[in-house]
Image (cartoon, coloured by chain):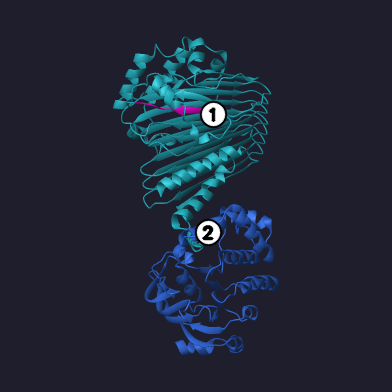
Amino acid sequence: MAAAVHLMKTPAELTLAETFAAVEDRLPGTGDMAAARAAAFARFAASGLPHRRVEAWRYTDLRTLMREAAPLAAPPDAAARAGAAGKGALFAALAARRLYVVNGAFVPELSDLSPEPGLMIRSMAAALAEGDPLVAAHLGQVVASDDAVLALNTALMGDGVVIHVAKGAALARPIHIVHVADLAAPAALFVRSLLVAEEEATVSLIETHEGPAEGAYQVNCALEIVAGDGAKVSRVKVTAEGPGALHLASLLARVGAQAAFSAAGFVLGGAVVRNQLAIRLDGAESVAHVSGASLLSGRQHADTTLAMEHTAPRCESREAFRAVLDGEARDVFQGRIAVRQAAQKTDARMMSRALLLSDRAEANAKPELEIFADDVQCGHGCTAGALDANLKFYLMARGIPETEAVALLVEAFVGEVVDQIEDETVRDALMGAIRAWLLARA
Amino acid sequence: MTPLLEIADLHAEIEGGRNILDGLSLTVNPGEVHAIMGPNGAGKSTLSYVLSGKPGYVITSGSIKLAGVELSELAPDARAALGLFLAFQYPLEIPGVSTMAFLHAAVNAQKKKRGEAEMTSPELLKRVREIGKSLDISAEMLRRPLNVGFSGGEKKRNETLQMMLLEPRLCVLDETDSGLDIDALKVVSNGVNALRAPDRSMVVITHYQRLLDYIVPDVVHVLAAGRIVHSGGKELALELEATGYAQFQTEAA
């Protein structure tokens, strides 16, 4: 069958093709890795930028939203490195191991690389250049995907972080990857990271993304996670990009048997944000909690697209998402739970709720269940609505001013997903960020 | 003496809807307890909402003054800070907002607006525990989200706790007896009676006379078809219990 080859035609697509041709030979990795890049770019070229007729991108027409492709970012200069040191302050109270990725490049001299038994951290660029066997074994193979944006990441990935946690190792501190964009002119960052937690390993990963208060820039980042049997892996991500950012992120995770996996994402910044998650529960009796909240104002657009796949029996998954929308903001939640035939006794529940604080805001929700096993408990639901006027009146009747009453109700609304995070310091930091968003709004 | 509450020829309607209050006048002096009784649909709950400023209720004419200050243009929180408290007939459940956090926000918002020193968390906790003890409210209840999973009686006790904590000048009790068994009614009434003071007034809205055995009013009014059609002493409540409201409904019509 002849592949339907998309002819690269938008200015952004043409620029990306030129960019790839120009840098292909300079990007880290040779041999199989270089071939994988070329194949990935060919995949991207075959489809082009995803648009509204691509079901997974139905509400986020990237062909329209990404008019131009920015040139690849240069390695961070001394000023950018120095400026990055103070970032990630949202989690300042957390005793974490901080790793810095500035303008898409891992910066070892800023990062805390003090040795810890069972922990290996290295730069993705170095790992690719040297043909690191861990990367060769897992990169691009954690969860199969034909997504064009992920293919573009694979083609153009420059750097990122590789983390390996050995069998049975429980890390003493969470790892916080501080992603910073510090750019004088529009640029594109392609970041790729890999976390491999072997059997019975315990690791908590936090990622924050921050950027300049002015100017347009583009981030395409991807993280692959392998959680071995009995591993306990949690990941919290805060997208607090600058107001001119186009942020496209992919999370791909494969979870073994009797493991505990959680992923929580919070969107507070960026012009256009897409967080796509593909999570596969591959071993029996695992538990996964996937959650997120987007707090949007102005003309922000955030899209969370989740594919949760149960392939093994007796797993439990919970998916909880919230959106708080002001101004003309637009939120998209697409969630699909797929239960394969072997995944008997699956227990999966998905709920998305949107709170519209403005008449002009928009929430789009598309929950789906795809079930091939006959003995399962699965459910989904979604709601979208304005703040309950009666609740607001009750609070105001006790003397609480309107802005404070709204803040209390919004915090309660988003708090339902924050409360699921295990670490109290992380929860407090997130509630602080939510409060700051509400204050900025008022 | 300035009346604490002075409602003059009040007309109000539900937004875009029908007229509910139709020339209601009522004067309550400091220290007095007034009962408002009346048949279903007379406008009793509407009166409580119009007093407290619930959105959706529009005052078309007339005035409401609290200690000489016109309330009709003020937001609900401003009315509360001036000392108006509405004990809801159906207190709302607010998931995700803890009872203590709510009390803290309410007390200090009012104090801030009045230019008073705010209460610290330990001060507040101590005070809430004291009041809670008198109302049979456990520490466990205070830790729960506001009214979530509370029984009808627990909700009314929680309303009473808020009232005792906020120390309003005017308490409006909207059908506080509804959904209460006799024991809960006694507990709530004791709380309300403890608040009776020479400078504090109460408007007790009720359908049944029973509540007035516990909260004994100085004046009883009959509200029918949106206005006060008859007033008398506390014995009027007993009379109404015996004869019903039919005579006043025809009078008003």
Expressed as whole percent of the image width and height from the top left, the position of residue A220 reads 42, 27
Asked if residue A198 shows in the view, the reply is yes
> Please, what is the three-letter code of the amino acid marked with disc 2?
Ala
* Residue plotted at (42% across, 16% down): A38
**Which colour represents chain A?**
cyan
Look at the picture and state if A36 lies above or below A61. above
Look at the picture and state if B166 lies above or below A257. below
Secondary element under disc 2, as helix, strand or loop, is helix
- Left-right relation of A63 to A205: left
**Which chain is in blue here?**
B
Expressed as whole percent of the image width and height from the top left, the position of residue B184 reads 68, 70
Expressed as whole percent of the image width and height from the top left, the position of residue B45 reads 50, 73
Asked if residue A7 shows in the view, the reply is no
Expressed as whole percent of the image width and height from the top left, the position of residue B173 reads 56, 72
Q: Chain of mark 1?
A: A
Disc number lying in front (2 or 1)? 2
Q: Which residue is mark 2?
A: B106
- Is residue B186 found inside the magenta-colored segment of the image? no
Cα gap from disc 2 to disc 1, whole angstroms: 37 Å
Which image quadrant: the N terminus of chain A? top left
Question: Mark number for residue A176?
Answer: 1
> Please, what is the three-letter code of the amino acid marked with disc 1?
His
The answer to which quarter of the image holds residue A282 is top right
The answer to which quarter of the image holds residue A272 is top left
- Left-right relation of A223 to A341: left
Q: Nearer the viewer, residue B106 or A412?
A: B106
Looking at the picture, do discs 2 and 1 lie on one chain? no
- Is residue A178 found inside the magenta-colored segment of the image? yes
Secondary element under disc 1, as helix, strand or loop, is strand
